[in-house]
Amino acid sequence: MSILSENIRYLRNQISSSQQKVADALFITRGRYAKYEDGASEPPIELLLRISRYFHISIDLMVSVDLRRISIKEIMELPDNRILLPVKVDEAGENRIEIIPHRASMGYLTGYSDPEYIERLQNITLPFLGLGKYRAFPAEGDSMPPHKDGAYIIGRYIDSFGQLKTGKSYVFITREEGITYKRLKEISNDRFLLSADNDFYDPYALPISDVFEIWEYTCSIATDEFKKEDFAPDHQTIIQMLKELKSEIKELRSKNK
């Protein structure tokens, strides 16, 4: 078996996926994909590009390095593995910021690496932003106040884990959750510990292998007017009461098991 066949088998196992699921994502049959894992044949360059984007690993690494000898975190931090996004500008030279609409947020999981999909998105420019590649993502739910459901978080693309800082908030594009906006609490060898600013929600671990993209918070756009009660002192008290109630319910359930 070639290094490539060993690597794609290893990467598939790392995400606990089936050959059929990977084949469906690549728009090929399971039998054809199985031949690549068995080393019976080599994928053409067009398909190799799709495989690279699916596993979020550069072609150079997949065909020349035994990935089993490197941790997923180290692989993602290698400069040669960066999947750089082009910075598009308008006629005035300002960065074009693509907007991911709420109705199309789930479609972003399959289209984030497709230039044609990105090209069809609406875009805006914000002259006060510095250098970098920016994109606007929809905020959903109440986990990150004061950002309301319907607001947009504008993030700057992170192309290396070395740029991440604990305590800052990021938009994570993940295999299971899709688009999620959370605060980074800790970084370990194989996972991130994320938390919501709303204390009602518990922190949770996100496997690094599940992450496709990371965008650092730079600013937000509110689509609803803030109200005085959004910042009322008793609002936080209610949140704390709900959190305590949640803990009590968990205890009751565990006792009744």
Image: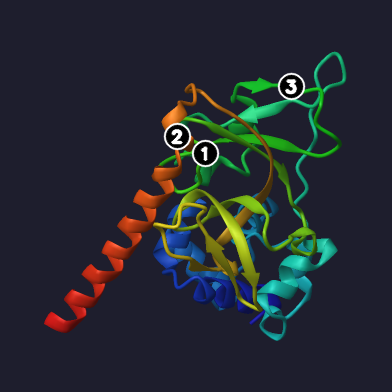
Q: Nearer the viewer, mark 3 or mark 2?
A: 2
**Element carrying mark 3:** loop
What amino acid type is highlighted by mark number 2?
Asp
What residue does disc 3 label? 125
User: What residue sits 41% from the left and 69% below the top?
Assistant: 18
Q: CA distance from mark 2 to mark 1?
A: 8 Å
Give percent across and percent down for residue 89: 81, 24
Coloring scheme used = rainbow
Q: Which label's residue is closer to the chain start, 2 or 1?
A: 1
- Is 126 situated left or right of 212 in this image? right
- From this viewpoint, is residue 168 visible? yes
* Callout 2–callout 1 Cβ contact below 8 Å: yes
Q: Which label's residue is closer to the chain start, 3 or 2?
A: 3
Give percent across and percent down for residue 225: 49, 21
- Between 86 and 159, the one lying in front of the other is 159
Image-quadrant location for residue 129: top right
- Is 157 situated left or right of 249 in this image? right
Which quadrant: the N terminus?
Answer: bottom right
What amino acid type is highlighted by mark number 1?
Pro
What residue does disc 1 label? 146
User: What residue sits 28% from the left and 64% below the top?
Assistant: 246
What residue does disc 2 label? 230
- Between 113 and 197, the one lying in front of the other is 197
Q: CA distance from mark 3 to mark 2?
A: 29 Å
Up-down relation of residue 96 to residue 91 (above or below): below
